[in-house]
Image (cartoon, rainbow, N blue to C red):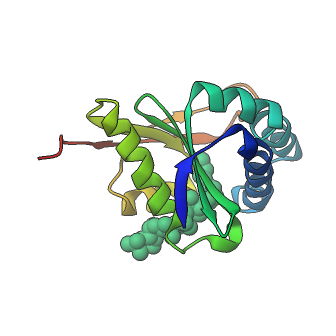
Amino acid sequence: MTIRPMTADDEQAVSDLLCRCYRWIAEPEGYTEEQVAYLLSERGSLETVRRESREEQYLVACRDGVLLGVVAVSDDVVTKLYVAPEHHGGGMGRTLFDAAVETVRASGFQRVSLGTTPATVPFYEALGMRVAGHKDHVSGVFSGRRTMLMEKSLPPKE
Ligand SMILES: CC(C)(COP(=O)(O)OP(=O)(O)OC[C@H]1O[C@@H](n2cnc3c(N)ncnc32)[C@H](O)[C@@H]1OP(=O)(O)O)[C@@H](O)C(=O)NCCC(=O)NCCS
């Protein structure tokens, strides 16, 4: 598996991967049709990927030339981490997360944080993150849902 910075040639593959992951998590997460439509048309669209990947640092995981995972970092925040569903449990999420943490650390931050769904908390706890709080959405398309806020200190390397 190779982890490398995303390029403009990856935009369509990243958009396709995100949309596949959003469809996959829709049922276990209990997303409404409106929420899925929002994720596909807003969060996973080619236009959004193109714009955000110019504003944030995106890394992709590839195997045999196929893009199978993506992680995005903005300052000290991991804003996205998705692995192709058929590859879950194979260590790709941890590898991408570790690469994101190194990106955060290299930018001089001593802490990494993120927001995620309650169901994904055990995964991030396995990576050393701890729950620092939560945000309950009271308006907008995700009204009624909870985002868990997680963080981890990054002591400088010896
Ligand atoms: C969450 C996600 C990125 C994890 O990626 P992954 O490649 O399956 O995870 P890994 O195989 O690298 O697992 C890393 C560690 O976390 C643990 N882990 C993974 N999922 C877990 C879970 N649901 N509960 C507890 N531990 C979990 C693994 O056991 C592993 O620990 P180990 O290395 O000590 O054995 C992936 O499942 C995914 O893309 N899910 C859909 C997207 C999503 O839910 N994103 C969050 C919404 S904001």
- Taking the spot 69% from the left edge, 64% from the top edge, the residue there is 65
Find residue 140 and report its horizontal and vertical position in percent.
74, 26
Is residue 78 depicted above or below 27 in this figure? above
Q: Is residue 132 visible?
A: no
| Quadrant of the image occupied by residue 141 | top right
Residue 144 placement: quadrant: top right
Q: As rendered, which of 9 and 114 lies closer to the eye? A: 9
Residue 92 visible, this angle: yes
**Above or below for 20 versus 115:** below
Direction from residue 26 to residue 57 in the image, left or right: left
Asked if residue 86 lies left or right of residue 38, the reply is left
From the top left corner, tell me how far across and down residue 126 is, in percent: 38, 63
Q: Nearer the viewer, residue 39 or 83?
A: 83
Q: Please give the count of numbered marks on the rendered protein.
A: 0
Q: Is residue 149 left or right of residue 26?
A: left
- Residue 67, position in %: x, y? 69, 59
- Residue 80 placed where, x, y %? 58, 43
Q: Residue at x 43, y 51 (%)?
A: 99
56 on left or right of 105: right
Q: Quadrant where the N terminus lies?
A: bottom right
Q: Residue at 45% of width from left, 34% of height from top?
A: 77
